[in-house]
Amino acid sequence: MPLKRTTVPVLLRSCLPAAVLGIVPEIIVNTPQGQTYRTFSHVRQEVLKLQPALIDSYATFSVITGILTGLNSSSVNHSCPRLVGLCAGISMGSVYSQFSSNLPAFASKATTTLSSSRFEVRRTCGYFTATVTKTSPHRLSPVYSCKSNDGKAIELESHQTVSHDWEYNT
Amino acid sequence: MSGIFKSGVFSQGFDKTTVINQVFTSITGSATINSSFARFVAPTGFISQGMQITGGGQGQGQLAFGTQLTTMILGIALKPVTFPASGNSFLLEFMDTVAGVGQVTIALLPGGQIQALRGDVLSGLTSLGISTATIPVNAYSQLQVQVTISTTVGVVEILLNGNPSPILSLTGINTQKTANTFTDAVKLGGAVTTQYDDWWMLDKTGSLNTYLGDKVVRTPLITADSATVGLNNWSTSPSQSTGNHYLNINENPPNDGTSFNFSATPGTRESYRTSQIVQSVGAISFINVFGRIQKDDGTARTIALMARNSNTDATGDTISDPSSWATVNTPFLNSPATSAPWTIAGYNGAGPQSDAEFGITVVS
């Protein structure tokens, strides 16, 4: 009996020629919560110059006028987050405009509806929503609302393209 | 490429183990790995840990490369819990272990600036340059550091948080403290308590030989056997039913010898799926597959680690199976399905488990 007791473990061990107890992949991928310097950073800066509602929500009308002037002159594609939040994954909207209007008249009014406007609003990734929010204090946005041409508020869906009027309420 | 670098890359997310000796070749002082030190909270189905080295000594944890490099790139996220009150606190040391001396040291100054120095505490330090940019206290920043060891054409270049514009760019300088034109180890830790995470290095011999950017090392849990019938054909201990082989290899940390799968038949394999990557944006630089393995008989055995994507396999280099439990790894820079860099969508597939699979096969 003592001899058998000693041989049994030896036999058991010999049946484990190649054993694995763990497989773990490490995936080296971009930081989703990185602070700055994404591919989008240059675009973001240009956007910030033109669109104070992104982060500096206390922007004055003069800046708004600047936005419209810029757009009016060259139909620039620009981006605007639909929501501003702390984490990645928050949707944002991109606004593309093709319009002409009386900008001084717009700037002097508290509420102006640019009925001749044609906008395409698209939701894209929220990647630079996170980066934007980390670079400045959070502030409450003034009211921007998107309305379709029939006057109803638009709830954007992913990659949806909508024609609508643009309304800015001070 | 040799030593700890395979396909020219190395990665350490501090997620696979809490045993500090499995991270460093040697360690002095106190270092701890746990989730509270992680740079990012783990997404569901992932492990996320970081490492903290308690302050009080300069250059406490050393990882030997097993090879001698004239030039290399290192990326790491680090969080100084406090700033040094005076002097500096080492963040990184590029060592020459043959001479036992640091060639280049990257240090933190009381104001948060990053300083590059030649030499180390023992051999004497010479400042090479100080960044204007600063890093915050008690918050993670990511540094990418490129060094070239030379008395005449030395380089120290430091990038912060993925910004391609260096915060410190020193070229044509003397970065060689010893008689040797190489670095063969790196040390972490300094005078102030500092946390580290998301560590990767390039030996600049592979296809990845320039800055990767601000990267996170994601470590998913193994959550299922292969989606393909027949790809999990090793024996199991304790016995597991078909489809549940993964239950023997998904412990964190590994429970050496308590549960495992085994085989001696060449060509047999195990293939496992993982959690899906939850982030939808970001480029995967590479995937490094780690296996904890052992052989338990007197015969020479070899295995290979595998990756699988869209039903296409890739088999890594043949690895000798050691007689005691050891961690081995094989990086897969490209998806087997496309021979192009992995994508998150390709990794995830339709779900709910990953389409990507990782495993092991008996070679001989």
Image (cartoon, grey):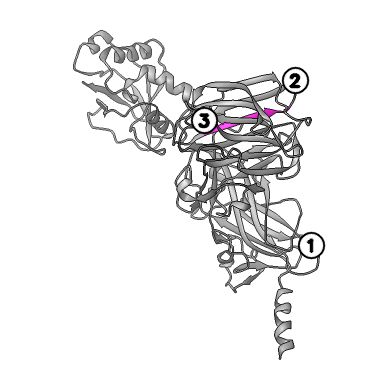
Q: How crowded is mark 1: few (under 14 residues within 10 Å), some or many (20 or more)?
A: some
The residue positioned farthest toward the left in the image shown: A110
- With respect to residue A146, does B198 lie above or below? below
**Considering depth in this image, is B87 or A124 the residue closer to the camera?**
B87
**Considering depth in this image, is A48 or A152 the residue closer to the camera?**
A48
Kind of residue sitting beneath label 1: Ser
Q: What SS does tag 2 mark?
A: loop
Q: Can you tell which of label 2 and label 1 is closer to the viewer?
A: 2
Q: Can you tell which of label 1 and label 3 is closer to the viewer?
A: 3
Q: Do the residues labelled 1 and 3 touch (CB within 8 Å)?
A: no
Q: Earlier in the sequence, mark 2 or mark 1?
A: 2
**Considering depth in this image, is B48 or B359 the residue closer to the camera?**
B48
The residue positioned farthest toward the right in the image shown: B299
Q: Is residue B362 left or right of residue B343?
A: right
Magenta segment? B142-149
Q: Name the residue under label 3.
A: B161
- With respect to residue B12, does B178 lie above or below? above
Residue B130 location, quadrant: top right
Percent coordinates x, y for residue A156 in the rendering: 33, 35
Q: Can you tell which of label 3 and label 2 is closer to the viewer?
A: 2
Q: What SS does tag 3 mark?
A: loop
Kind of residue sitting beneath label 2: Thr
Q: Residue at x 64, y 20 (%)?
A: B170
Kind of residue sitting beneath label 3: Asn
Q: Mark 2 points at which residue?
A: B152
Quadrant where the C terminus of chain B is found in the figure: bottom right
Chain letter for the residue marked with disc 2 in the picture = B
Percent coordinates x, y for residue B338 in the rendering: 65, 43
